[in-house]
Amino acid sequence: MKVFVAGATGAIGRELVPRLVAAGHEVHGMTRSDAKRAMIREMGAVPVVADALDPRAVAAAVADARPDVIVHQLTAIPQTTDLRHPDRMFALTNRLRTEGTDHLLSAGQAVGVRRFVAQSNIAAYARTGGPVKTEDDPIDATPPDVLRANLEALRHLEEAVLGATWTEGVVLRYGWFYGPGTSLAPGGEQFELIRKRRFPLVGDGSAVFSFIHVADAAEATVAAVEHGARGTYNVVDDDPARVVEWLPELARTLGAKEPRRVPRLVARLLAGEAGAVMMTELRGASNAKAKQVLAWRPSYPSWRQGFAAT
């Protein structure tokens, strides 16, 4: 098949494109940077330079490639985290998830793509109810004000993709990424903060995280490209874990001291409401549907194995 990957040089894109090529697909990788043409070519794909927020440029790029499948992996997340102002930190990513999604869908409809696969995130789930969510559970209806724009962008993306009746819309709700190109990797921001004891355990650390190695996320995406049925899929490992469990374990893996403990009120003052919510209220997710429908299994069933390998 011909596969058009928007966001081909991001953390997932760099893992995904070579796997699609190895599987025998003709891949066209889109980037907004002319300097990244060589990277895409080295991965075995046809480089396409276009601004995802320019509808004419996107339409021309997709029309030229005439793909069977479009994969939407567009994000613009800064290297440095600013949890006090996530609305600012994710402002461009939110545009890519709204305007960028609409441009790709319009371009895809014009050439009749058979399948449209898009990146979403398990952070959208409601912070009430059980600790582990399935695809049938609702998205958060009452997010903190600083996270509202981010959630609305994810909601727009999912509704637009799943509502496109002319194609097979597939939404992949990825877990928390770790591995090459992410902040949870050697030299990455989160690893270094943990090493320096600047990543505290907030409150009771009751938030539940479901992680996924970027290579495993890419493998699930290949499966979705090749035989994904319309719908939403959680792409996470088998081992949801509370922060109070995984953070000290990761610190030990990195040879760091135990994380400091900080009351939630203090965390809100230092890292803002978003930081406090992330560490005390988030829910994990189940990968049962992805395993069954996509016939996919993570090579790192648990973050314990994956962190050690990383």
Image (cartoon, rainbow, N blue to C red):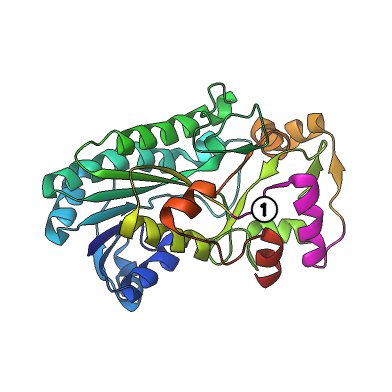
Q: Describe residue 10's horizontal placement relative to residue 33 as left or right.
A: right
Vertical side of 65 occupied by 154: above or below: above
Q: Describe residue 54's horizontal placement relative to residue 133 as left or right.
A: left
Query: Which residue does the image show at 36% across and 62% down from the upper left?
Result: 8
Can you give x and y, in whole percent of width and height, for residue 103 in the image?
Answer: 24, 42
Q: Describe residue 283's horizontal placement relative to residue 203 as left or right.
A: left
Can you give x and y, in whole percent of width and height, for residue 215 in the image?
Answer: 51, 66
Quarter of the image where the C terminus is located: bottom right
Q: Residues within 10 Å of mark 1 (few under 14, many from 20)?
A: some
Can you give x and y, in whole percent of width and height, for residue 219 in the image?
Answer: 45, 64
Question: Which residue is identified by label 1?
Answer: 239
Vertical side of 78 occupied by 265: above or below: above
Mark 1, secondary structure of its residue: loop
160 in magenta: no
Judge by depth and name the residue closer to the eye, 154 or 149.
154
Can you give x and y, in whole percent of width and height, for residue 39 in the image?
Answer: 36, 73
Q: Give the range drawn in magenta.
A: 237-257
